[in-house]
Amino acid sequence: MSRKPSLFLTLNINKSFWRRYAAVSLKSEISWKTLLYTEEKVFCQGKFMQSRVHVVQGDITTMAVDVIVNAANSSLLGGGGVDGAIHRAAGPALLEACKQVIQQQGECPTGHAVITLAGNLPAKAVIHTVGPVWQGGDHHEAERLEEAYLNTLQLALANGYQSIAFPAISTGVYGYPRAAAAEIAVNTVLRFTTRRALPEQIYFVCFDDETAQLYNRLLTQQGDVNPA
Ligand code: AR6
């Protein structure tokens, strides 16, 4: 059953929007239009509720959230794509921190995640996770990708982080088909948010408009069926 929101509720939603806009965008370069466009309102138990999951189009290195996620490789020594961008923006302290992790616990296997400081980034920390290389779909790629999201969320929760920003893991150099990867990302994150209070705000940061639209469509569909 649908119901129109009261003016009071609408004002509350707007207040909450502006609070989050101030928190996320002051230090980053995300326009208010982007965030407004991607705001999700979920109708749940007779009320409009603000979703905890958001889509943003832009560069993840500018996100002023508690933790940003790096789509790394097992060596943790940097690379191209989002990994290269994060290391460039963070500066040499990030590479040093990654080297220390490798020294202490060896390489990071596919689907696992490790946490480091964030150097010069606006975020407080970086969680490096290793997504699967796409090999046609019958090499457990979907399970490994789900693990990468889950282990990352669990690490953020264990560290008490309130906000986290994900790139589209594995969809660049590693060749995972974008639509299939987005479905795993959205389903895994939504399932996690129904069981856990943290991270409270989760951002999917998409480099291009097409990927942002893909995530928005999936979140809208999921919102109808299973509001978070
Ligand atoms: N902000 C947000 N998203 C980005 C950015 C950015 N600054 N730059 C790229 N993307 P990829 P993978 C998107 O290749 O497929 C590296 O060399 C990009 O459009 O970065 O997991 C690592 O060292 C794509 O949608 O990561 C590994 O060796 C997504 O980020 C390997 O690539 C992921 O693309 C990992 O490959």
Image: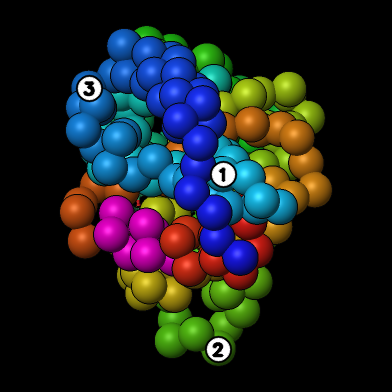
The answer to the question of whether label 2 and label 3 lie on touching residues, with beta carbons closer than 8 A, is no
Residue 61: % across, % down: 32, 27
Which residues are the magenta region?
212-218
Q: Is 80 left or right of 119, judged from the image as shown? A: left
Residue 87 as seen in the image, left or right of residue 160: left
Residue 114 vertical position relative to residue 144 in the rendered view, above or below: above
Q: Amino acid at mark 2?
A: Asp
Of the two numbered discs 2 and 3 on the same chain, state the one appearing first in sequence. 3
| Vertical placement of residue 38 versus 155, above or below | below
Residue type for callout 3: Glu
Label 1 sits on residue = 48
Q: Is residue 11 above or below residue 148?
A: above
Q: Amino acid at mark 1?
A: Phe
Q: Which sits in the foreground, 2 or 171?
A: 2
Main secondary structure along the magenta-highlighted residues: helix
- Badge 3 density bin: few <14, some 14–19, many ≥20, Cα 10 Å: some
Q: Report the residue marked by disc 3.
A: 29
Element class at badge 1:
strand
Tag 2 secondary structure: loop
Q: Are marks 1 and 2 in contact (CB under 8 Å)?
A: no
Q: Which residue is at a point 63% across and 45% down the rendered structure image? A: 47
The dot on residue 138 is: 2
